[in-house]
Image (tube, rainbow, N blue to C red):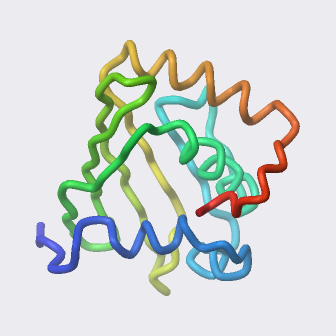
Amino acid sequence: MSQHSAKPGQDWLATVASGDMAAFAAAFSAEPQLSASVLPESIFGVAHIRAFFEASRAMYGQIAFTRESRTGNQCFLEWEGSFRGLPVEGVTVLDHDAANLIERVRLFHLPSMQVAAFADELAQRLTSPPETTGQSPCA
């Protein structure tokens, strides 16, 4: 497994923070999948994955990638942050296809107490109508 030389998570953060749907979509294969410990089932498609990240990004008090490793077509991003003032950490695994487009995202949160609370709030945010704040959802 090799260590990536750039700041951990830099490329992924640029993708997720892109305010342009076309730029976000350009990083993914035609039918990407996202599976997460905070979701009851996998979600599919760029629009749904973007909605997930728009909702979840707003929930963290802070988040930072601490380590990035790559092996073959996979990128492993370890991260630490806070949710509701308590520590949360996890790993994001990005699987790339032969064209280096993201075809699958796997997202794991710890500890389990935070997983349950995060999942509950995320479900509410994903089923509630979007609020208009005047800010880019990925800012």
Relative to 86, does residue 88 appear above or below in the rendering?
below
On screen, residue 73 versus residue 30, left or right, reads left
Of the pair 121 and 3, the residue shown nearer to us: 121
- Report the quarter where the N terminus lies: bottom left
- State the residue at coordinates (47%, 31%): 37
- Which residue appears at 28% of the width and 58% of the height? 76
Which quadrant of the structure image shows residue 32? bottom right
Q: Residue furthest right?
A: 129
Q: Residue furthest top?
A: 113
Please tell me which residue is depicted at 36% across the width and 47% down the height of the picture: 63
User: From the viewer's perspective, is residue 3 above or below residue 109?
Assistant: below
Q: Is residue 67 left or right of residue 92?
A: left
Instruction: Check the picture and name the quadrant holding the C terminus.
Output: bottom right
Q: Nearer the viewer, residue 87 or 26?
A: 87
As drawn, 88 above or below 106 = above
Residue 35 appears at what percent x and percent y? 53, 42
Return the x and y of residue 43 as percentages of the image width and height: 67, 45
